Image (cartoon, helix red, strand yellow):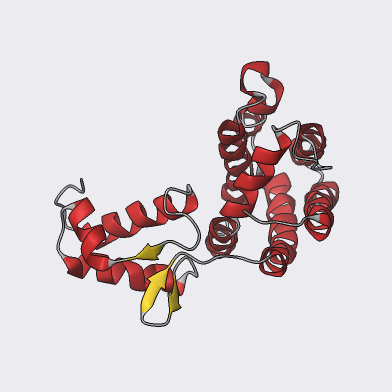
Amino acid sequence: MISRAPALREQVYINIRNRIVNGDLEPGRVLVEVELADELQVSRTPVSNALIMLKERGLVEEEGSRLRVPILTLPDVTQLYWCRMAHDGLASRLAAQRITDIEILKLESCLLAWETPVQENDYSALWVNDLNFHQMIYQLADNKHLLRFSETTMELGAAYQRNTFRRMTDPNSGTERSRSDVRVEHKAIFEAIAAHRPDEAEEAARQHIRMVIAHLEQADVVL
C-alpha cells in the first residue's frame, strides 16, 4: 500500500519502477492502470502519470493500445552496454580522482558478497551487490548528469543482469562467464580507484564491460 504524501506520483513511480527492475513485473507484462491503482490503493491519476514517466525512461513501452514492460533483444542489451562502457569508464576515472580513505572502505565492502561463501550461490545477492558496486562508483564520480545516464542504462539492462547471475550460479547452464571472472574484474577496478590511478581505473572499467559484451555476443537468450 502507498502512503498518502505530497509526492504521491513520485511514490507510485518508484514503486512500479522498482518492481520492473527487480523482475516482479516481468518483461512482456501488460500494465493496466486500474489494476495497478487497485493494488496500490490510489486513484488512476498518479498511476497514469507514473506510467508516462516510465515510458520516457524506456521502462514501459506501447504495444498497440496497451502498455507493457519491454522485452529486450540481445542487440538491445549489447547497445546498452556500449553506452555503459563510456559511462563506466568516465565514472571510474572521476572516482579515482576524488575518492577518500573512508569511501575506499565503503567501496571495498561492496565486494564482500563475491568473497562470502554463504552468498556465493545466491544470484539475487550477487546481482544486488553488483548494482551497489557500480552505483557507488557513479556516486563517487560526483557528476549528477553521469549518474542519471547510468541509472537509465542499469534499469534497462536489469533483466539481462539477473539472468546472467542466475546462470552463473547454475552448474547446468552452460554459460562461459563465471563468478570468478566478475570478481577479478571488479577487483581490478577497485584497486585502481583506491590507488588514485585514473587511467588504470578507466581502462579496468572499460575492460569489464568489454567482457560483458563478449559474453553477450555468445549468448542465446536475455531472460
All told, the count of numbered labels is 0
- Point out residue 145 in the picture as x, y percentages from the top left corner: 55, 65
- Foreground residue, 112 or 70? 70
| Identity of the residue furthest to the front in this view | 172
Q: Residue at x 21, y 60 (%)?
A: 37
* Residue occupying the point 42% across, 82% down: 64
Residue 216 lies left or right of residue 106; in this view the side is: right
Q: Is residue 7 something one can see in this rendering? A: no
Is 103 above or below relative to 61? above
Locate the N terminus and report the quarter of the image it occupies: top left
Give residue 105's position: percent from left, percent from top: 63, 27
Task: Determine the residue positioned at 60% across, 45% down.
Answer: 162
Task: Name, please, the residue furthest toward the bottom.
Answer: 64
Looking at the picture, how far across and down is residue 116, in whole percent?
66, 19
Q: Is residue 220 above or below residue 123?
A: below
Res 102 → quadrant: top right
Q: Is residue 5 visible?
A: yes
104 above or below 223? above
Where is residue 43 shown, x and y percent of the image? Answer: 14, 63
Q: Is residue 222 above or below residue 110?
A: below
- Residue at the spot 62% in from the left edge and 53% down from the top edge: 223
Kindly indicate the quadrant of the structure image that contains residue 152: bottom right
